[in-house]
Image (tube, grey):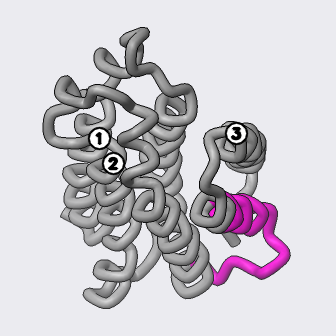
Amino acid sequence: MSHFEFVIISFALIYSHSAVRLYSALPHLNRRSSRYPPMIFYIMFILFGTAITFWSLWSYRDVQWDFLAYIRHLATPACLFYLAVTLVPDNPAKVASWEKHFFEIRTRFFGGLIVFASILSINVTLTAAMPLYHPMRVVHLCVALLGVAGLLATSQGAHKKIMWFAILSLLTAIVVNMAPSSLN
């Protein structure tokens, strides 16, 4: 087994736990009495983040892995798992109001997004030598700005507007990741 295969298998376990946690909320999010569109969107946003960061690991297939790089990159799926368990409680069926739940966890969630964007940016700089002008930096910046805006905003209306910014960020990530280029 190569170092890359070892790394990808261990990361896949964490990514899959994140995805399962997020998927566990889906049947409960659409109840009329408790539906809150930003919450639905952020769960889908982190599901997409889980998929795209796992997919991007292929860019590291030729990296000479050492323990420090492994630990540094382990922070990415660990942070996504943190975001997943922050968004979705142990028993999502018991959530009476997803809006109330969102405002209870919003500082942890948006703070986690800032940490997540920072981890991504640091890892691609140190491991893939990504230049500062690379298009993926726009995605990192958008996620960090999303986190800052979410931390600062306290009203429901502001969070719906932030959700639209997040949708634009998501579309940017899709376009950038579809381009036939590497991380460096």
Dot 2 amino acid type: Ala
Q: Toward which corner of the image does residue 126 lie, by quadrant?
A: bottom right
Judge by depth and name the residue closer to the eye, 85 or 132: 85
**Is label 3 or label 2 in front?**
3
Across and down, in percent, residue 12 comes to 27, 50
Q: Is residue 38 above or below residue 112?
A: above
Q: Which residue is mark 2?
A: 84
Cα distance in 3D space between marks 1 and 3: 22 Å
For residue 175: magenta?
no
Secondary structure of residue under mark 1: loop
Please give the residue where the numbered disc 3 appears in the rendered image.
157
Q: Secondary structure at mark 3?
A: helix
Q: Is residue 132 visible?
A: yes
Q: Quadrant of the C terminus?
A: bottom right
> Are discs 2 and 1 less than 8 Å apart at CB?
yes
Q: Which residues are magenta?
A: 128-146
Quadrant the N terminus occupies = bottom left
CA gap, disc 2 and disc 1: 6 Å
Q: Where, by quadrant of the figure, is residue 118 drawn? A: bottom right
Residue sitting nearer the eye, 31 or 117: 31
Looking at the rendered structure, the kind of residue marked 1 is Val
What secondary structure is the magenta-colored segment mainly? helix
Q: Which residue is mark 1?
A: 88
Q: Amino acid at mark 3?
A: Gly
Q: Could you say where residue 69 lies in the image, as x and y percent from the top left?
A: 37, 84
